[in-house]
Image (tube, grey):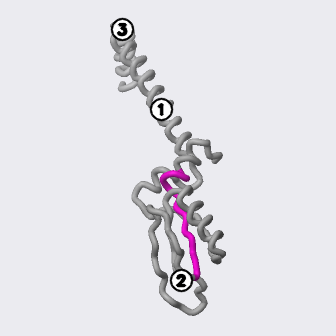
Amino acid sequence: MQLTRFDRWLRARFVHETHVYTLRPAVRVPAGIRHEELPAAVGKRYRHRYIAHRPELAQTLIAQLKEDSQMFATRVVDRKAWFVPYLAPKERSVTWWIAWKVVAIIAGIFILTLIKSLWDNPNMRANILDALKILKS
């Protein structure tokens, strides 16, 4: 389904995080970026991972790495948090899901109000009860 601007903002702000991989540690790391040293393994090129939850912080770190002529790679991944499936369901739009729920609630209220008004009418109630008696026999 087509994502709305609100869906994209939710994903960028609360769901995605940027991983920046480097060969050697960065000289200066902006506050708010988490550093992890990766274990040495055969076939692994990068030794350090920097995790930024906000894109602005990642851009600051990337600019710093470019300034220091340091090789790096970036990946944008989903966070591992309990709220991620609710804010970014796979191939669904949160905005449209909420819109359909609101429409369903309004339609339910309208239908229940209509049924209640019909039931409060004594002639209609008598007709319904007579119809039920006929159906039972």
Disc 2: CA contacts within 10 A as few (<14), some (14-19) or many (>=20): some
- Region rendered in magenta: 11-23
Q: Disc 3 designates what residue?
A: 121
Compare marks 3 and 2 and give the one earlier in the sequence. 2
Q: Secondary structure at mark 1?
A: helix
Out of 119 and 136, give the one closest to the viewer. Answer: 119
Residue 91: x and y in percent read: 59, 53
Q: Amino acid type of disc 3?
A: Asn
Compare marks 1 and 2 and give the one earlier in the sequence. 2
| Marks 1 and 2, how far apart at CA | 49 Å
Q: Are marks 1 and 2 in contact (CB under 8 Å)?
A: no
Disc 1: CA contacts within 10 A as few (<14), some (14-19) or many (>=20): few
Q: Residue at x 61, y 69 (%)?
A: 74
| Marks 1 and 3, how far apart at CA | 29 Å
Q: Residue at x 39, y 13 (%)?
A: 118
Residue 65, placed above or below residue 57? below
Q: Disc 2 designates what residue?
A: 47
Compare marks 1 and 3 and give the one earlier in the sequence. 1
Question: Residue 90's image quarter?
Answer: bottom right
Q: Amino acid type of disc 2?
A: Arg
Q: Disc 1 designates what residue?
A: 102
- Tell me if residue 16 is in the magenta stretch: yes
Q: Residue at x 33, y 11 (%)?
A: 120
Residue 25, placed above or below residue 98? below
Residue 16: x and y in percent read: 53, 58
Residue 22: x and y in percent read: 58, 77
